[in-house]
Amino acid sequence: MKERYTIGEVAALLNMSPQTIRFYDKSGIVVPHYTDQKTGYRYYSYDQIHYISRVKYLQRFGFRLEDIREALASNDIGQFKQFLIRRRQSIQKELDHLQELLKELDWYVEYYDHIDYYNYNNLPYKVKEPERYLLAEPLAPGEDIYGTAGKRLTKLQHSEAFSHTRFLRQNGYLLDFPSLLAGKIVPTHYFVYLRELPEIRCPNLMRIPAGTYFCTQSRILSEPFDSTFVRQYFRDAAAPCLALANEYEDNFTSFKDCIYEVQVLEMA
């Protein structure tokens, strides 16, 4: 069996560049078995080829070279196994995070698909909604509905208490139902949606019940609200119904002109 292999031969066997193998040497990862003092040529043993192959394989998992060096230098299989397990746990955590991001991206795509589907044609429709969660800031009577409670909500949303909370990119208003029937938009709260309720106590956290919602679309901040369909549909309502308006961005410059989907919960 051949005892010595040049750096070029090792590189060809492992489909690596000679520069990478030289870097392994300078980093103390794999020091050549023999170096010719006259020519400076590096020579590697057969065992070292397999060692370099193992280092190359481990790099695929995102290990740093210094960590690989320490793990292999211990020559302890038990410790090496724990080294692999810790990396697996780290990758799993990253994967869980990426899966959560994918879910949020799917939601965000659906957010824009939703308003396109109903096409702002002034016709009412119904949607079935799951239970939803809000962080909501109340509006004071007579307070400007744009930019006041929103400022307070933004501060609360970005406070330390909610630093680990998963918010969705959608805001809206809880509406006074009797005013809505009269064609007036009178918000009681300004809110932002959450993926799930955090395990903290806060009076600003709310649950919106699952159910069927009667919907219309309107630019409630810049145009008069036509309450005809809502008034006709809920003319026999014995008690005030839950009403809210979800913002749907159709531009990124003038949020006052955004479309809102006004939802009213059908009573059982």
Image: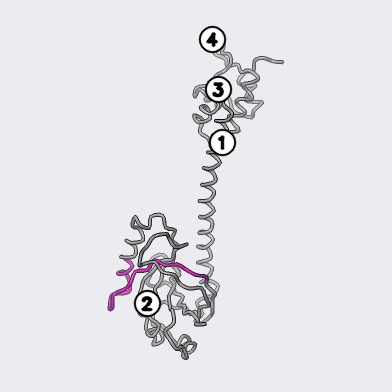
Pointer 1 or 3: first along the chain? 3
Kind of residue indicated by mark 4: Gln
Please tell me how crowded label 1 is: few (under 14), some (14-19), or many (20+) other residues with Cα within 10 Å.
some
CA gap, disc 1 to disc 3? Answer: 20 Å
Pointer 2 or 1: first along the chain? 1
CA gap, disc 3 to disc 4? Answer: 18 Å
| Residue wearing tag 4 | 37
Question: In x, y percent, where is residue 188?
Answer: 35, 76
Kind of residue indicated by mark 3: Val
Point out the stretch of residues depicted in magenta.
Answer: 130-151
Would you say the residues marked 2 and 1 are in contact, meaning their CB atoms lie under 8 Å apart?
no
Which of 75 and 98 lies nearest the eye of the viewer?
75
Q: Nearer the viewer, mark 2 or mark 1?
A: 1
| Residue wearing tag 2 | 222
| Residue wearing tag 1 | 84
CA gap, disc 4 to disc 2? Answer: 83 Å
Pointer 4 or 1: first along the chain? 4
Which of 24 and 209 lies nearest the eye of the viewer?
209
| Residue wearing tag 3 | 30
Q: Nearer the viewer, mark 3 or mark 4?
A: 3
Applied colour scheme: one colour
Depicted 256 relative to depicted 231: above or below: above
Relative to 112, 5 lies left or right:
right
Relative to 144, 164 lies left or right:
right
Please tell me how crowded label 4 is: few (under 14), some (14-19), or many (20+) other residues with Cα within 10 Å.
few
Residue that appears at 54% across and 19% down: 31
Name the image quarter holding the N terminus: top right
